[in-house]
Amino acid sequence: MRERINLLKDYQDAANQLRDVIPLAKFKSQKWRLVAVSRDGLDIANKLRGKLDNKINFLFSESIYAPNNEECEIARVSEGEEIVINENLVDSFGIKYDYIYGEAHRKHEEKILSYIYQYRKGKPFESVKDEVVLLVDNGSESGLKFMTALKAVLSQKPKAVYIAVPVIPSDVLESLEPFCDDIFFLYDIDDYVETSIYYESIEYISEDKIEEILGE
């Protein structure tokens, strides 16, 4: 395994550097909507927004793992029950789609709905129809999280959809590009390992902090 590579100090550093590659002037003129796809992405989105009044939301999703292997993500389900499947893994392991759909429904009922009630007081994801959306995360190992968010957001017919992510695998970058208007990133990495090694430190974002950000 490669040695730890600290490309970024922390999420504040990542947000500061992303500001140099994102056209922030358009935030005021177009009222971009920031949509986090993870709790870490929410922290970066909040730091990226700074004192601007752009809205922030959290699009919840959950991983679906291979049977008897909780480290192998084969699909992902969003709060609108959109499902994105890693077809190569599913075919390789001979996993039945009934299993995936069953797990997707279970994760939605048991986990995602609880997040919606906890963090949004039961309110559904606010429509982004005809709006400019910026999807944000701290990194991306497989691209499934972003792809699930894209599927959910694009179904609402936004004006445009962008992605902001500090570090991203080169192959994931290529796979996501056709589905969004642009991707703002700092590092695309050929031999991506896992997101955490690219930060010197990662601050845990508490439940209270999530509720505070989403309640603003």
Image: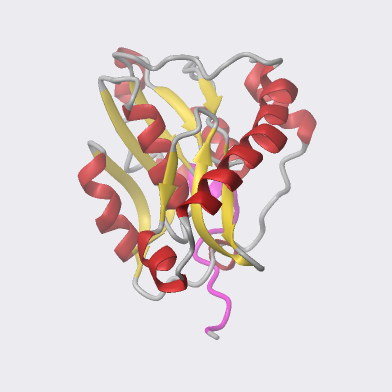
Report whether 144 appears left or right of 4.
Answer: left
- Image location (x, y in percent) of residue 19: 40, 39
**Horizontally, is 42 left or right of 15 in the view?**
right
Q: Looking at the picture, does residue 50 appear above or below residue 13?
A: above
| 138 with respect to 132 (left or right) | right
At 57% across and 34% down in the image, what residue appears? 60
Nearer to the camera, 145 or 73: 73
- Residue shown at 58% from the left, 59% from the top: 65
Most foreground residue, 115 or 187: 115
Furthest residue to the bottom?
Answer: 1
Image point (70%, 24%), residue name: 119
Q: How many marks?
A: 0
Taking the magenta stretch, the answer to whether it contains residue 66 is no
Residue 48, relative to residue 32: is it above or below? below
What colour scheme does the image use?
secondary structure
Residue 31 in the image: x percent, y percent? 37, 15
- If the image is split into quadrants, where does the C terminus sit? top right
Residue 173 place in picture, x, y as percent: 30, 56
Along the line of sight, which residue is nearer the eye, 72 or 190?
Answer: 72
The reply to whether the magenta stretch includes residue 13 is yes
Q: Is residue 7 above or below residue 99?
A: below
How far across and how far down the image is residue 180, in percent? 26, 38
Q: Nearer the viewer, residue 102 or 209?
A: 102
Secondary structure of the magenta portion, mostly?
loop
Res. 28 image quadrant: top left
Quarter of the image where the N terminus is located: bottom right
**Residue 138 visible in the shown view:** no
Residue 76 seen from this side:
yes
| Region of the chain picked out in magenta, as a range | 2-15
Q: Residue at x 48, y 63 (%)?
A: 95
Quadrant in which residue 89 is drawn: bottom left
